[in-house]
Image: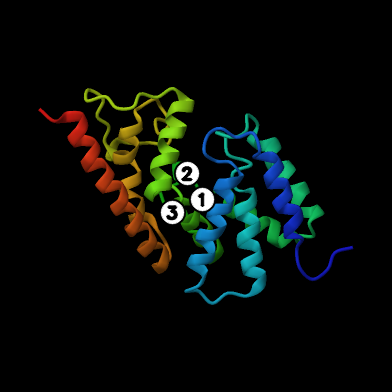
Amino acid sequence: MCGVYMDLTKIQQFSKERLAGDLTGHDYRHICRVIKNANDIMKDETLAQSQVDLIHAAIYVHDVIDDKVTTDPDKALQDVDQCLKDACVTEEEIHHIHDIITHMSYSRNLQSRYELTLEGQIVQDADRIDSLGAMGIARTFYYAGQAGHLLYDEECPRDLETLTTDNYRNQGTAINHFYEKLIHLHKTMNRPSAKRLAKERTEVIESFLDQFNHEAYRS
């Protein structure tokens, strides 16, 4: 029997189970941090409880369909649908969550920027903030090690202007990822509070890169 609100506990448990074995930095702990980021962003927004619930639901399931996490994103999306239905999420809300989680990724927005709803903007910002700061540094090296990427290579420069959806995930280096994406990510934030949080974390990355380059390339 469905009540007025969706069953977030059921969606949360689904997320925890599906992401339990992830080794790419998109595990359930990542989800918990993104929830906290979203809550920080929402302190400066005026939202109904139904909007807050939808934001949390989208965060819980957004990485279940990521092709870094699953070999069958289409099947994963079907599983997400079933979970949401079982959790008393309305058809309109399911469509809204679909729109968010299928259009929020960085690679989906390289050629042109998709216009997300307010809820989608908050989810996207909260997720991207977890790619910045000390946590972003840790996740970058964690993923690079798992993917077999080099730490750095002075003969392997890559330019943000030449990145396309097709070559975005081609093998580069861990350090290149900071220059290709992460130090520019704060400019893609949607909400004012997210821009502030992202800028603070970007300064952490810039400080790290200064020290790294000194140690790696000093004469």
Is 53 placed left or right of 29 in the picture? right
User: Does the residue at mark 2 contact the one at mark 1 (Cβ under 8 Å)?
Assistant: yes
Q: Which residue is mark 2?
A: 108
At 61% from the left and 45% from the top, the residue drawn is: 28
Real-space Cα separation, disc 1 to disc 3, in angstroms: 13 Å
Amino acid type of the residue tagged 1 in the rendering: Met
On the image, the x and y values in percent for residue 88 come to 80, 60
Relative to 47, residue 94 above or below: above
At 73% from the left and 46% from the top, the residue drawn is: 14
Whichever of labels 2 and 3 marks the residue nearer the N terminus, that label is 2
The C terminus, quarter of image: top left
Which of the two marks, 1 or 3, is nearer to us in this view?
3
Q: Mark number for residue 77? A: none
Real-space Cα separation, disc 2 to disc 3, in angstroms: 17 Å
The N terminus, quarter of image: bottom right
As helix, strand or loop, the secondary structure at mark 1 comes to loop
Amino acid type of the residue tagged 2 in the rendering: Arg
Q: Which residue is mark 3?
A: 129
User: Does the residue at mark 2 contact the one at mark 3 (Cβ under 8 Å)?
Assistant: no
Whether residue 102 is visible here, answered yes or no, is no
On the image, the x and y values in percent for residue 120 come to 54, 59
As helix, strand or loop, the secondary structure at mark 3 comes to helix
User: Does the residue at mark 1 contact the one at mark 3 (Cβ under 8 Å)?
Assistant: no
On the image, the x and y values in percent for residue 136 come to 41, 45
On the image, the x and y values in percent for residue 158 come to 27, 32
Of residues 166 and 62, the one drawn nearer to the viewer in this rendering: 62
Number of marks in the image? 3
As helix, strand or loop, the secondary structure at mark 2 comes to helix
Of residues 154 and 167, the one drawn nearer to the viewer in this rendering: 154
Q: Which residue is mark 1?
A: 104
Relative to 130, residue 122 above or below: below
